[in-house]
Image (cartoon, coloured by chain):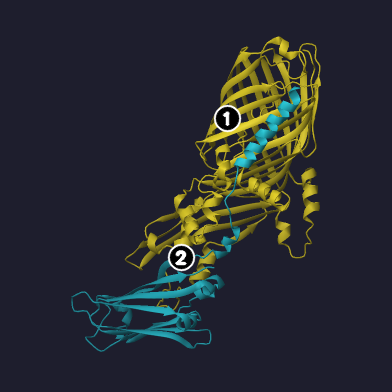
Amino acid sequence: MRKIILIFVLFLAIDCFSQNKQILYNFTSVPQSLMTNPGADFKYNWYAGVPLLSGISANVGSSGFSAYDLFADNGVDFNVKLRNAVFSSTRKDKVAINEQIEIFNGGFKIAGEQSDSYISFGMYQEFDMLSYVPKDIAILALDGNRNYLGKVFNLGDLSAKAEMLSVFHLGFHKNITEKFILGVRGKIYSSIYNANSTNNSGYIYTISSDTGVYEQMIYSQLQLNTSGIAQYDDQDYEPNVAKDITKRALLGGNLGLGFDAGFTYYPKKNIQVTASIIDVGFIKHSKEVESLTFKGTYKYEGVIPNFSSGNSAGGGYQEFKEAIPLDTLYADYTTWRPAKFNTSVQYSFDEERPEDCNCLNYDPETTYKSAVGAQLFVMSTPRTPLVAFTTYYRRKIFKALQMKATYTLDSYSYKNIGLGLSSHFGPVNFYVLADNLLEYSDVTKANSLSFQLGLNVIFKNTKK
Amino acid sequence: MKRPALNRVVGLLILLVFSFSCASDLDYDQANDLKLEPIFVANLVYFDVPANEFVTNGVEQSVIFDTPTVDVFNDDFFRDNLKKVEFFFEMENTINRAYSVDLVFLDNNNQRVHATNFSVPAYTGAENKVTKTEIFENAQLDLLKRTTKIVFTLTMLPGATLNENSSGRLKLRSGVTAYLVVE
């Protein structure tokens, strides 16, 4: 059992990364594909996710180094491995974790005269962490400044954020015409805690000087915003973390609003175009906020006696603390959710013979067995947006089993092959999707992995 | 008939993924071995005294002094992790007089923890520099960490009389190299 937990944790720790759900996107045999495009072409009478089991997804990625690079049990000194990891990465490299668990999820159809409308709703919990490699600061900590005279250490390398939140959502999609499906989804975010330090700037440099031995300058504009954490600092406070989290998850946290929107369009019967934008929204942090700042400029000249007046400068450390004070603020702040944009083009072929459809009530709308397509994913980050490009092949293997295979190019990997399977036995839908399959030969060396799995109950009309 | 076949396929696929996947042994306890050994350089002390500061109202002041406070050793982190220190001094004199320069490091109780002296010859037109390097480790370093102020005493030795228009400067540049070990 312990081993299973370990493997699962490892999965969570290594396996997930950027929130790019390239296998799930437009994989309309799975209801959760609605979460990546509220305008997905997914038809049902009603469906319900098995609570807590309908949608489990995790994503971990590290573009600069893998868990193996740092923690391999290979006899190499940890400090050597750490140096190698730091010096081989760049300030653009990042470590990211995303995890989502659906608490509940469901949907039903509202029959219309012209066309049907579909409602979907649910709640999920999400954890998000993203940190860039603070390379310059790591070099200062590892080596100091002696061998780096003239180098300007960039304090803006420090950029990280973490958040746990719960999301309540209500979605609607409708066939506007035979060829065009439009969907929107409203979301209420309830932030359980948030910490972010993403708008940092500043520098430290040391150069040779004629006046002193060195000219040494620190300019710092560092700020860390937190919400939902401050109270744990208070020694008198007796924490009841489980109760706090439950309360904040159920709309008792810092609240925010957002929306998703998307469409599916068939210019021809066998050609499909889709696009969606997910998590356009913000959270206003006003409860239990605490911000720490380190802002100022300081030029260090050393101890300077003044023989003529007796008013000598010399309290260097005190001067530094006054020039760049550590301040605590309690001001409200707003964070934006990482917005995600997806789009795809798909060409379907291999038309299905109608008699194949007689025995099962499964997906009578699908008239093609196979499809190929391409997808683009863009996500906003504190710096340049993250972009991933995917090509895929989708195939109905049996009447009850659909498969989607993907090949994805992104900043983490250029050989990311993923596979998704969705099975329907009667009304029961089980799906499992995983990417970076080539890395499964040794998951510890993977730079990124992600998986999603879940269990749903779906009822569809046999006709229409 | 088809369902058992299907189950077999799905079962096989899942089995395949998990049997081919494996993980190297990872040892997260290694993080406890973390040892940082940065080396920092910074200015230590600096002064630049023009010749006329040794003259007040036309009268030579043969001794001038000042006692600035030094608080870099007040910081616990620095004090705990500092393992070795190198001082580098460079005196440059362009005044036509010789000097004896004393730096005395005092602790909170005004007890001397370290002292250093420079004999600086008078300027005769050629480059006139005196340099010195001092290294502190172990017990000597522990003593140095008690420093809270430095007494600077500049003593002008006998020679040709200076007036308020005399040229030249007495200049001290010094840097410190601090070897930290953080475990």
Mark 2 crowd level (few <14, some 14–19, many ≥20, 10 Å Cα): some
The mark closer to the camera, 1 or 2, is 1
Q: Eyeballing the image, is A30 above or below A123?
A: above
Q: Name which residue lies at 53% across and 87% down.
A: B109
Q: Which chain is yellow?
A: A
Determine which residue is flagged by label 2: B38
Residue A371 picture quarter: top right
Name chain B's colour: cyan
User: Mark 1, chain letter?
Assistant: A
Quarter of the image where one finds residue A175? top right
Q: Which residue is label 1 attached to?
A: A406
Residue farthest to the left, as pictured: B125
Could you say which is closer to the camera, residue B54 or residue A379? A379
Image check: A341 left or right of B87? right
- Which corner quadrant holds the C terminus of chain A? top right
Which percent across, then down, holds residue A91?
48, 48
The answer to whether one can see residue A397 in this image is yes
| A50 relative position to A66: left or right | right
Foreground pick, A444 / A144: A444
Say whether residue A270 is visible: no
- Residue nearest the viewer, comparing B14 with A453: B14
Instruction: State left or right for residue B57 relative to residue A118.
Output: left
User: Where residue B81 sits: x, y (%)?
Assistant: 52, 72
Q: State the image coordinates of residue A133 (x, y, percent, origin top left).
A: 52, 50
CA–CA distance in space, label 1 to label 2: 46 Å
Residue A309 rendering spot, x and y as whole percentages: 42, 77
**Which amino acid type corresponds to the residue marked 1 in the rendered image?**
Thr
Q: Nearer the viewer, residue A353 or A462?
A: A353
Three-letter code, disc 2 = Pro
- Residue A290 quadrant: bottom right
